[in-house]
Structure formats: structure tokens, C-alpha cells
Image (spheres, rainbow, N blue to C red):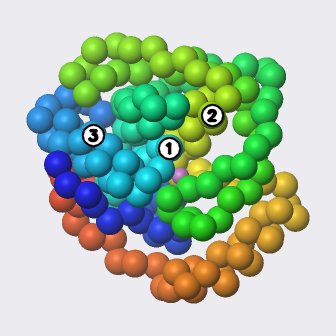
């Protein structure tokens, strides 16, 4: 397990639709380990595999002192909503109030391939929705209203990382389980 560089907004891997995991092997467990270590080091409330350049449906979370992961998540959302500040390790330093469902039930798998259900409200629900969005190439500023989104894009251009050209997509340190073919 190792801390990996986090891909920044503008990197095409963050806009790709991640592939479902089909092989629950040692390499997958290494990926979960790297995600966990990188997330805790940042520190952040969650991290999705595309943020490490791996286009697979995997994320980790660290909310209210509980650390975990979920693979191939399938979400059911409450109708009730919440609104509050949200940020992303791929957009360092930027936070915007973002509307989300208040609660979520997420079905998926552990890194050993066992089915698991993750339920949460408030911050955990926000995190699960944010990280699952990453697996669909959605970044939280996409959820903002038009004016707010415009302000966010301007703020990104004004950061020291936002004006840089999109980085070259590197070969992942992990197998992509066929996703790169
Ligand atoms: Ni994020």
C-alpha cells in the first residue's frame, strides 16, 4: 500500500465512466489499500479510484471516525434533501454548498467479493453520493446551479493548479482489469 498522487480537475480520467469490478483479487485489495492510505493522508472524507487514475467502480470513505470501502455501488436515495458545504480532493481548496439527498442506501461489494449494504444520512450520505458521482465522471461542481458553477470555474482558473494543461494519462500502477484495452 502506498500514498498515490491525486488527479486534479481537468484530468480526463475524472470524466470517464468507470468500469465495474469483475475480479476480486489481490490487486483490487492493493487498490483499496492505496485509496484508503491516500484519503487518510490528504486528509479527505472520501476518495474514488478514478482520482488515482484507475477507472474502476471503487471508493473509500472516512466519515465520523469510520473508514470503509465499497465496490460497484448501487444507490437508493431519499426524497428528502440536504444542502451544505462540499469539497473534493481533485479541486483542492474549493468548497461550495451542494444539494444532495439526505439519506442513501448503497448496495455493493467488499474487496473480497461479499455483498454489503452501506446506509447513511447527512455527511456519510453526501460522501457516498459524491464518490459514486466520480465513478460516472461527474464532479460535484456539475451539481451547482448555473451562477454558482460559473463562479466555481472562474475560481478554478485562478488557482495555481487550474490553469495548467491537462496532464498526460499515465499508465496506472495497477492493472485496469481490461478497462484500458
Ligand atoms: Ni471528489
* Residue at mark 1 to residue at mark 3: CA–CA distance: 15 Å
Question: Which residue is tagged 1?
Answer: 45
Which comes before the other along the chain, label 3 or label 2?
3
Secondary structure at numbered mark 2? helix
Q: In which quarter of the view is residue 125 placed?
A: top right
Residue 77 seen = no
Q: Disc 2 vs disc 1: Cβ atoms closer than 8 Å?
A: yes
Which comes before the other along the chain, label 2 or label 1?
1
Q: Find the residue positioned furthest to the left.
A: 26
How packed mark 2 is, by other alpha carbons closer than 10 Å (few <14, some 14-19, many 20 or more), is some
Mark seen at residue 140: none
| Foreground pick, 42 / 180 | 42
Which comes before the other along the chain, label 1 or label 3?
3
* Residue at mark 3 to residue at mark 2: CA–CA distance: 21 Å
Residue at 67 percent across and 50 percent down: it is 86
Answer above or below: position of 35 versus 153: above
The CB of the residue at mark 1 lies under 8 Å from ligand 1: no
Secondary structure at numbered mark 3? helix
Question: Which residue is tagged 3?
Answer: 32
Question: Which residue is tagged 2?
Answer: 123
Amino acid at each position: 500500500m502506498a500514498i498515490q498522487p491525486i488527479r486534479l480537475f481537468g484530468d480526463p480520467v475524472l470524466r470517464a465512466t468507470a468500469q465495474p469490478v469483475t475480479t476480486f483479487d489481490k490487486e483490487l485489495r492493493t487498490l483499496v489499500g492505496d485509496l484508503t492510505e491516500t484519503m487518510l493522508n490528504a486528509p479527505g472524507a472520501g476518495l474514488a479510484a478514478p482520482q488515482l487514475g484507475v477507472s474502476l467502480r471503487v471508493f473509500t470513505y472516512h466519515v465520523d471516525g469510520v473508514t470503509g470501502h465499497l465496490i460497484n455501488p448501487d444507490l437508493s436515495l431519499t426524497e428528502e434533501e440536504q444542502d451544505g458545504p462540499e469539497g473534493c480532493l481533485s479541486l483542492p481548496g474549493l468548497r461550495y454548498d451542494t444539494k444532495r439527498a439526505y439519506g442513501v442506501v448503497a448496495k455493493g461489494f467488499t474487496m473480497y467479493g461479499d455483498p454489503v449494504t452501506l446506509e447513511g444520512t447527512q455527511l456519510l450520505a453526501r460522501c457516498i453520493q459524491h464518490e459514486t458521482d466520480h465513478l460516472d465522471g461527474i464532479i460535484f461542481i456539475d451539481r451547482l446551479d448555473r451562477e454558482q458553477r460559473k463562479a466555481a470555474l472562474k475560481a478554478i482558473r485562478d488557482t495555481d493548479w487550474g490553469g495548467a494543461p491537462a496532464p498526460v494519462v499515465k499508465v496506472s500502477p495497477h492493472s485496469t482489469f481490461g478497462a484500458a484495452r
